[in-house]
Every structure is written in C-alpha cells, then in structure tokens.
C-alpha cells in the first residue's frame, strides 16, 4: 500500500507549487514572451517529483547516481526553471533573465549551462528518446537511478514519440516513468481538432507500457502513481495526467490563447493576486 502524504507534506507541496506558478508568471511577463499555459498545467507534477520523490541535490547536480528528468515539451521551460530555482539549483532572482541576451535561461532548456537540466530539449518529440537512452544506460551500468520524462499531449502528434514508445518496452526499461500533460490544448487549438492523438491511454497500452490515468493536480494521486510505477517490472510506465491549461489562474484556465502569450504587467499583477487568494 502506498504511503500517504501527511497533511504537512501536502501543505508544503501546495506552497511550493504556488511559488513555482507565481515565478512562472513573473518570468514570462518580464521576458514578454514564453509559454505560460502549459507551464502552469505541469507545475504540480514537477512539484511532486522534485520535492517528494526524485533523488537530486543542487550541491551535486552531476552526481552519477542522481535521478534524471527530461522536459520533452521543452517550450514549457518556465516550469522547469522555476522548479529548479525553488529547489536551490540557482537563485530565484535569475528567473527574471528568461529569454534575455546572455542569460542561461533561454526559451528552451540547455543542459551545458543550467545546473539541474539533464537534457537540452525544444524540438518536440525527441525528449522521450533521450530519456530512453538514459534509462538504458542505467540498466547497462547497473545504476539504481530512475528516469522521468514529461511530454505534452500535442507533442504526441510527433512520429518520433511512437518510435520511442516501441523502444522502451522492447528493452524492458522499468526504470523509466513518463508523464503526458493531458490538458487538451495546443497552440493551434484543441488537440482533438488539430491532429487527434486520442485515445491516449489505450495507445500506450498497445505499445506495451504500464499505463496509469490520474488527476494531474492531485498531489497524492501523482505520488501514488510514481510509487506504483516503481513496483512494475520489465516495462516502462506512462502516467496520463489529466490537467488544466493555465491551472491556478482562473483567467488563464482552459484558454488556448495563453499557450504562448505573455501577460502584460497589469495582467500579471492581477493574476498574482488571484493566485495568492486561492
């Protein structure tokens, strides 16, 4: 039976997620560009990974035995940057340099410059392949680390995703857990209208994955799914997390326009106030 998170742990996770969401809004507003909608929808998943599960230490970001995380939907870099800063990999003040000239924090994550980033991503569809390689290397090297990846639901329209989907079960990568941020919207509209990847759970099951479907904003559900994945042998796990685009800011929730648009300073102040008043 999965251990239940204590009320204190749940409160701490909620506070971390709120801080991460606030910093997503601040950094995208300051940059005047970026992708807030899908960053906000994934904030709870990354919060649980980095503050309740993953073996990572800002003091030793290249530790060979650390757990790995790949943000396959690299345009959601603000959620990764905000989470890494919250964890202590670099100062939160640096978040306001997002997308600025000479900043480490460019529009997509870059592994050679940013501590805590395990893979440079941005060209959609490629991150899961990289995560597969990390997981296979862990098996070959007899390491105990685990690999986590986050894909967008619109990203599932990329063909390389399905090549990677075949690879992981074939090599029995049970040290790999991936998430689909299933918020139903991509830059051009609802995923079912643009190029439907539905039904998502059944597709991953057909490719040989262990599949779990959860509420992607329920900390206990996210945690339970991760623990369940760790008990599964000889196959990877895909956690299909049902989420809300723009989660946490009511004015942004389920509004496709916020996929890749920055708030004005006035809007940001209103959104931060709404977030604080949850």
Image: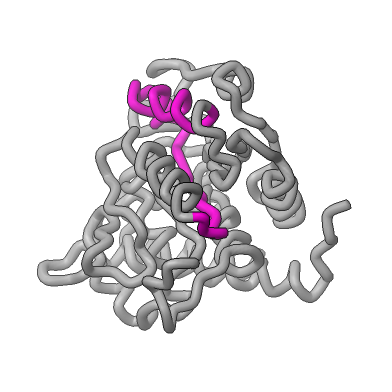
Instruction: Name which quarter of the figure residue 237 lies in.
Output: top right
Q: Is residue 179 above or below residue 169?
A: below
Residue toward you, 188 or 175: 175
Question: Is residue 61 within the magenta segment?
Answer: no
Residue 174 location, x and y as percent?
60, 41
Colour basis: one colour
> Residue at horizontal 68%, vertical 44%?
229
In the rendered view, does 131 fall on the left or right side of 122? Answer: right
**Residue for point 72% across, 52% down:** 227
38 vs 30, left or right, is right
x, y percent for residue 135 = 47, 47
Residue 117 lies in quadrant: bottom left
Q: Which stretch is magenta? A: 142-169
Q: Residue at x 42, y 75 (%)?
A: 85
Q: Does 51 sit above or below residue 71?
A: below
Q: Is residue 1 positioned above or below 13 on the image? A: above
**Quick check: is 156 in the magenta stretch?**
yes
x and y percentages locating residue 228 in the rendered image: 74, 46
């Amino acid at each position: 039976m999965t251990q239940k998170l204590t009320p204190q742990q749940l409160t701490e996770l909620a506070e971390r997620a709120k801080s991460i969401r606030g910093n997503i809004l601040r950094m995208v507003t300051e940059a005047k560009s970026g992708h807030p909608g899908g960053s906000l929808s994934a904030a709870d998943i990354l919060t649980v990974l980095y503050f309740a599960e993953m073996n990572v230490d800002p003091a030793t970001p290249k530790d060979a035995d650390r757990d790995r995380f790949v943000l396959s939907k690299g345009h959601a870099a603000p959620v990764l940057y905000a989470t890494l800063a919250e964890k202590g990999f670099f100062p939160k003040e640096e978040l306001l340099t997002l997308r600025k000239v000479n900043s480490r924090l460019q529009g997509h994550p870059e592994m050679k410059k940013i501590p805590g980033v395990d893979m440079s991503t941005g060209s959609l569809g490629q991150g899961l392949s990289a995560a597969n390689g990390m997981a296979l290397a862990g098996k070959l090297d007899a390491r105990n680390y685990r690999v986590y990846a986050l894909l967008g639901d619109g990203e599932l329209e990329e063909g390389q995703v399905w090549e990677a989907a075949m690879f992981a079960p074939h090599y029995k990568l049970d040290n790999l857990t991936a998430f689909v941020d299933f918020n139903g919207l991509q830059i051009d509209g609802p995923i079912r209208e643009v190029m439907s990847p539905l039904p998502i759970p059944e597709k991953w099951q057909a490719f040989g994955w262990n599949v779990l479907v959860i509420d992607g904003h329920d900390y206990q559900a996210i945690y339970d799914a991760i623990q369940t994945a760790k008990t599964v042998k000889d196959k990877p796990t895909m956690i299909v997390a049902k989420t809300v685009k723009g989660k946490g800011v009511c004015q942004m929730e389920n509004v496709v326009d916020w996929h890749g648009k920055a708030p004005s300073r006035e809007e940001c102040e209103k959104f931060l106030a709404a977030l604080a008043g949850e």
